[in-house]
Amino acid sequence: MQIFQNNKQSLSTLRELPFKLEKEIQTLFEQNIELLSSLKLVKSEFTIKSNRIDTLAFDTESQAFVIIEYKRSQNYSVVDQGVSYLNLMLDYRADFIIEYNEVHGESLKRNDVDWSQSRIIFVSPSFTDFQKQSTNFKDFGIELWEIKQFENDIITINQIKKSKSAPSIGQMQKGDSSEISKLAKEIKAYSEEDHLQGKSDATVELYETYKNAILNLGSDIDVKPQKMVIGFTCKGKVFADVLVLKSELKFWINLKTGNLDDPKLLTRDVSNVGHWGSGDYEIRVSDTRNLEYIMSLVKQALVV
């Protein structure tokens, strides 16, 4: 990625400034973790069974723990360390829950956590082609994020996306008793197909229509299927969720009560009601009559 500075229509390149220490990356990421990833910080330098985890975080959207590791160089195996740490988490679940509850003063229980969505994020200035290829499995639970800093205090962060044709790690590990095979049985990758299975053609078409309308709101929007809902994210932050029902869709807009301008009053305040998606506003749709208006509501969460 080339970064330019615009000085009266004359472009000049910005020089990349290498990070001197991994700790620099860690401090920068942890101090801005909610902005960068929508994750909730649990503990920096979390030690368990003689293993030191750089950052332990929690994804409130998927209700899962996330391990974050920072690397300044490319001389390491993301697969070996990633698999080892994910299996460590799954073997010692109670320790992670205790740490979360002690830090945040909550009473998170083992069944409150979706362990199948556990994942590890590696953050580094760059990754090799081999590292990218070796983690290109849709249900591997390992993500690669590139971070770079440039002069004039410019920071860029880019999550390396898995290819749409990425295979399942389970398919590659049949008959294998390795740690990867063990992990493949625990980690579950949810897809849009999981949510649309058994739904009528009309409901599927309704979902596709609203999905395409949301994707057209911006160039950086991604679809993130979860266990119960399908999330829509922009730069890693969930701004809307949808639950596909038998004959309708249920949307949640990720804004707090009082922050949505809805003159037609189509949404319902669910801040005090249990619900799957993020945000305090819920809306049910069974047709496309108010599609344009609903997109104007969703867009309010996108620009925040």
Image (tube, rainbow, N blue to C red):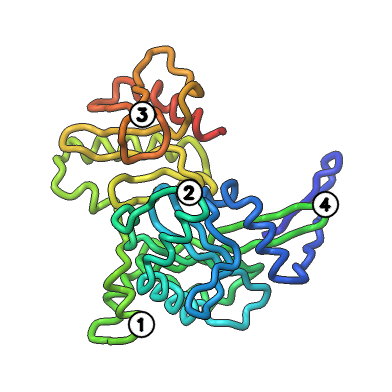
Residue to which mark 2 is pinned: 105
Percent position (x, y) of residue 132?
51, 73
Which numbered mark, 1 or 4, is in the foreground of this view?
A: 1
Mark 4 neighbour density, 10 Å: few (under 14) some (14–19) many (20 or more): few
Identify the image quadrant of the C terminus: top right
Which numbered mark, 2 or 1, is in the foreground of this view?
A: 2
Location of residue 31 with respect to 18 vertically, above or below: above
Which numbered mark, 3 or 1, is in the foreground of this view?
A: 3
Dot 4 falls on a residue whose secondary structure is loop
Circle nearer the N terminus (2, 1): 2
At horizontal 28% and vertical 27% (from top left) the residue drawn is 284
- Write down the quadrant of residue 285 in the picture: top left
At horizontal 45% and vertical 53% (from top left) the residue drawn is 59
Residue contact at pointers 2 and 1, CB within 8 angstroms? no
In terms of depth relative to the viewer, which is nearer, 40 or 170? 40
In terms of depth relative to the viewer, which is nearer, 51 or 256? 51
The amino acid type of the residue labelled 1 equals: Glu
Q: Would residue 124 be found to the left or right of residue 256 on screen?
A: right
Location of residue 226 with respect to 274 vertically, above or below: below
Dot 3 falls on a residue whose secondary structure is loop
Mark 3 neighbour density, 10 Å: few (under 14) some (14–19) many (20 or more): few
Residue to which mark 3 is pinned: 272
Q: Please give the label number shown on residue 169.
A: none
Residue to which mark 1 is pinned: 179
Mark 2 neighbour density, 10 Å: few (under 14) some (14–19) many (20 or more): few
Dot 2 falls on a residue whose secondary structure is loop
Residue to which mark 4 is pinned: 152
Q: Would residue 205 be found to the left or right of residue 130 on screen?
A: left
